[in-house]
């Protein structure tokens, strides 16, 4: 139903743009893309049922935009993806907002806006602008895409020239995550092992900001982003294996999940045909879980848990010709920054390599023409921190690998 | 004797290569042009870069800018490298990011110097570039500081 509403919304927006835009200042612009990927992995399933090889990775986007007045621009994008069990080719309203640019140093965007995060969160779906199929997972985890893509709210942005090709760009945002559209979140909760019979979410506003310095050194930019929010999840589960002291029936779990902070520090250097990028991220999350059995007078509160996460990557790509670009990446993520080796997790009975993931990959991009590109890449990985137990019930091996290919058409 | 002749021949060849390279560079050297309504006779390099990256949206008198490019070719490569500080592929990627996140519309694109000149001459606020030696009838030739 939600997809249907989104589809109606975008048809309405498109109609307004096509009819109204033509009558006003600028002619409406229409752009789109279609991507088809292939994933194959060894030892584990990665993002999809990939161990046997899968074409279950499709992305489609269609957007409209028009300058309806000298300083006012409106637009929207319809987006659909299928990646394993995520997306299922449902059509959603990816972004849709009005953008009033009062002056170059101060503009406003109101609507469903792309969320800042690192250098590339806002462009994570734009396959044509990067060398690899996926963005580095330490900063842009693919299984978080649905809840970190955009917010419904508003933002201000602008830029200041500092002369000598140097400038400052900023953006501040506030709004709500659309958790109810996140199949991922439902799956993560369900993945805990109990069938979910009811699931509700609520969020406090998310606040985010970014600051970018385009330095006087040609092509070198430094960037910083920050996000914070609080989520409330309420699930009703059927416990098949409840502790002996509990009634093994329906049980309500309430989770207060606080994203205390999530920041990313970034460096990007475009030097002739060479692109060098490094990003470092840290985050802190606090969650408080309380459980209520049917008929119980009071919920039972679990101890508050706090987790510090972190990761970093370095990536290089060199364009040898208009047709061919080659790249390499080293990407590291730790879901528990205080136990990077996983030793404490192992002592507690867990699997040590669930606390780290170190991915080295080689990537190749072929630009057949302005509208068609093909990517091919291979990765060797040590650790399983970002593998989902939804696809992998056990994690017996520390080392694994994956291969991918992707074709994207755009206009 | 042979050694002297060999050195002379080598120097001549090197000179010819340099002259040829210089000729190519001169042909590709972009000349920045603007509509006659655009204020001033010169633009500073950082403003020109801001215009082509969508960061600068108005001229000094507050009128809107309207940038344009020529599709491909040495003159475009030279213009982008000299004034926008990006390669052609980096420039294309930059604007694809803007298009697919709704933050901007790329400069209008033309197929030749003549098309560019005709559009700039007829469009208030327009700015573009052509190859050195190309006719710029009806346009203001801009110096870049």
Image (cartoon, coloured by chain):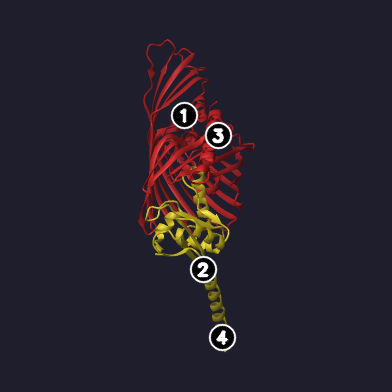
Chain colours: A red, B yellow
| Circle 2 residue | B132
Label 3 Cα neighbours within 10 Å, binned few <14 / some 14-19 / many ≥20: some
| Circle 3 residue | A11
Q: Are marks 3 and 4 in contact (CB under 8 Å)?
A: no
| Circle 4 residue | B3
Coordinates of residue B65 in the picture (x, y in percent): 44, 54
Chain for disc number 2 = B
User: A107 above or below B81?
Assistant: above
Label 1 Cα neighbours within 10 Å, binned few <14 / some 14-19 / many ≥20: many
Nearer-N-terminus badge (1/3): 3
Chain for disc number 4 = B
Q: Residue at image x 60%, y 55%?
A: A323
| Among the 4 quarters of the image, the one containing residue A229 | top left
| Label 2, label 3: how far apart the Cα atoms are | 47 Å
Label 4 Cα neighbours within 10 Å, binned few <14 / some 14-19 / many ≥20: few
| Label 1, label 4: how far apart the Cα atoms are | 80 Å
Q: Are marks 1 and 4 on the same chain?
A: no
Q: Nearer the viewer, residue A65 or A139?
A: A65
Coordinates of residue A231 in the picture (x, y in percent): 41, 28
Q: Residue at image x 51%, y 46%?
A: B99
Chain for disc number 1 = A
Q: Residue at image x 47%, y 39%?
A: A356
Q: Which mark is residue A162?
A: none
**In the structure shown, which secondary structural element does the residue marked by tag 4 occupy?**
helix
Q: Nearer the viewer, residue A66 or A327?
A: A66
């Amino acid at each position: 139903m939600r997809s249907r509403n989104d589809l109606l919304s975008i048809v309405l927006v498109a109609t307004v743009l096509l009819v109204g835009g033509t009558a006003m200042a600028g002619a409406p612009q229409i752009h789109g893309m279609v991507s088809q990927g292939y994933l194959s992995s060894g030892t584990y399933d990665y993002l999809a049922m990939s161990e046997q090889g899968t074409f279950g990775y499709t992305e489609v986007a269609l957007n409209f935009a028009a300058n309806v007045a000298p300083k006012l621009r409106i637009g929207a994008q319809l987006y659909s993806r299928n990646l394993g069990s995520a997306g299922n080719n449902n059509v959603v309203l990816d972004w849709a907002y009005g953008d009033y640019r009062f002056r170059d140093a101060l503009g406003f965007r109101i609507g469903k806006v792309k969320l800042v995060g690192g250098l590339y969160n806002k462009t994570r779906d734009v396959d044509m602008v990067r060398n690899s199929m996926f963005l580095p997972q330490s900063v842009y985890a693919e299984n978080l895409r649905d809840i970190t893509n955009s917010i419904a709210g508003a933002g201000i942005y602008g830029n200041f020239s500092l002369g000598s090709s140097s400038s400052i760009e900023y953006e501040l945002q506030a709004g709500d995550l659309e958790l109810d559209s996140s199949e991922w979140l439902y799956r993560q909760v369900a993945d805990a092992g109990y069938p979910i019979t009811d699931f509700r979410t609520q969020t406090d506003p998310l606040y985010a900001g970014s600051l970018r310095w385009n330095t006087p050194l040609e092509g070198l930019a430094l960037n910083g982003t920050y996000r914070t929010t609080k989520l409330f999840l309420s699930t009703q589960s059927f416990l098949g294996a409840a502790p002996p002291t509990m009634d093994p029936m329906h049980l309500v779990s309430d989770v207060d999940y606080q994203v205390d902070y999530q920041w990313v520090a970034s460096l990007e250097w475009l030097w002739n045909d060479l692109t060098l990028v490094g990003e470092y991220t840290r985050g802190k999350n606090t969650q408080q879980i309380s459980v209520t059995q049917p008929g119980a007078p009071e919920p039972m509160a679990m101890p508050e848990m706090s987790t510090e996460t972190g990761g970093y990557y370095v990536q290089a790509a060199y364009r040898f010709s208009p047709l061919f670009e080659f790249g390499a990446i080293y990407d590291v993520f730790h879901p528990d920054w205080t136990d990077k080796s996983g030793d404490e997790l192992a002592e507690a009975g867990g699997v040590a390599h669930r606390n780290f993931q170190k991915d080295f990959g080689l990537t190749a991009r072929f630009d057949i023409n302005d509208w068609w590109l093909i990517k091919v890449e291979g990765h060797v990985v040590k650790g399983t921190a970002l593998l989902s137990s939804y696809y992998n019930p056990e994690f017996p091996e520390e080392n694994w690998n994956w291969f991918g290919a992707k074709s994207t058409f755009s206009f | 004797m042979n050694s002297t002749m060999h050195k002379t021949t080598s120097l001549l060849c090197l000179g010819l290569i340099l002259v040829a390279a210089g000729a190519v560079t001169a042909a590709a050297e972009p000349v920045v042009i603007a509509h006659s309504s655009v204020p001033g006779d010169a633009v500073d390099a950082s403003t020109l870069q801001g215009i082509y990256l969508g960061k600068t949206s108005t001229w000094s008198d507050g009128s809107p800018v309207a940038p344009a490019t020529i599709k491909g070719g040495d003159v475009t490569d030279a213009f982008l490298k000299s004034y926008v500080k990006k390669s052609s592929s980096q420039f294309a990627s930059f604007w694809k990011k803007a298009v697919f996140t709704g933050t901007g519309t790329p400069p209008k694109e033309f197929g030749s110097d003549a098309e560019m000149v005709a559009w700039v001459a007829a469009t208030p606020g327009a700015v573009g570039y052509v190859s050195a030696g190309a006719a710029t009838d009806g346009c203001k030739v801009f110096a870049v500081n």
